[in-house]
Image: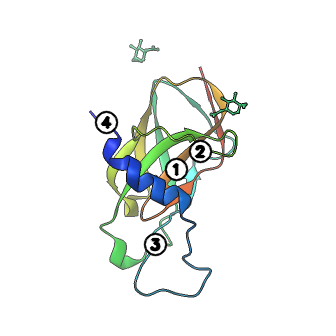
Amino acid sequence: MYTGIPFAFALGVCVSATPTTSTNGKSHHLTVVNPHITSPSQEDVSFVNSTHVVTWDTSTIPPENKDDTGLLLLGYLENGSENLDMNPLASDFLLVNGQVPVFVPIVPARPNYIVVLFGDSGNASPMFAIKH
Ligand SMILES: *[C@@H]1O[C@H](CO)[C@@H](O)[C@H](O)[C@H]1NC(C)=O
Ligand SMILES: *[C@@H]1O[C@H](CO)[C@@H](O)[C@H](O)[C@H]1NC(C)=O
């Protein structure tokens, strides 16, 4: 069972840090892996108490990061905050796999859910609805 506590500190750092990968010149000292989530998309409606496959684009993952693992969190956008649930939907999966099946827990129905994929940095999906 995940307590989520070990992730809390790292997460705070990730969320507040703006990824600076490809914009402000190239850094060869630090590779930031920040895969783009392709599912869930804006049109998806996910239902609770069932399994869904979250997918992301692996084309930007450099070969030297092939062993990097990810962390996937569920949150919802409200008041400009991501309101992330610290109990991961999935963790320790390989980012190069491009997908991970997750069990969607019984959470309140909302139209503004997101999943955030953490490699070295965080990348949020478009908002999607969860219905009951
Ligand atoms: C969740 O799904 C399981 C398996 O389908 C079912 O037995 C259980 O009643 C469901 N729980 C709720 C709260 O819907
Ligand atoms: C967002 O703001 C409203 C109004 O202040 C408040 O009632 C609500 O609890 C806030 N939501 C979160 C997730 O903090």
Mark 1: give few (<14), some (14-19) or many (20+) Cα within 10 Å: many
Under mark 1, the amino acid is Val
Q: Position of residue 79 (x, y in %)?
A: 70, 40
* Dot placed on the residue nearer the N-terminal end, 4 or 2: 4
Q: Which residue is mark 1?
A: 116
Q: Which residue is mark 2?
A: 82
Q: Who's the residue at 58% across and 87% down the image?
A: 25
- Tell me how far mark 4 sits from mark 1, CA to CA: 18 Å
Q: Which residue is mark 3?
A: 32
* Dot placed on the residue nearer the N-terminal end, 2 or 1: 2
* Dot placed on the residue nearer the N-terminal end, 3 or 2: 3
Q: Position of residue 63 (x, y in %)?
A: 37, 78
Looking at the image, do the residues carrying marks 1 and 3 touch, with CB atoms under 8 Å apart? no
Q: For this view, does 68 lie left or right of residue 42?
A: left
Looking at the image, do the residues carrying marks 2 and 1 touch, with CB atoms under 8 Å apart? yes
* Dot placed on the residue nearer the N-terminal end, 4 or 1: 4
- Tell me how far mark 2 sits from mark 1, CA to CA: 9 Å
Q: Label 3's element?
A: loop
**Residue 91, label in figure:** none
Under mark 2, the amino acid is Glu
Q: Which residue is mark 4?
A: 3
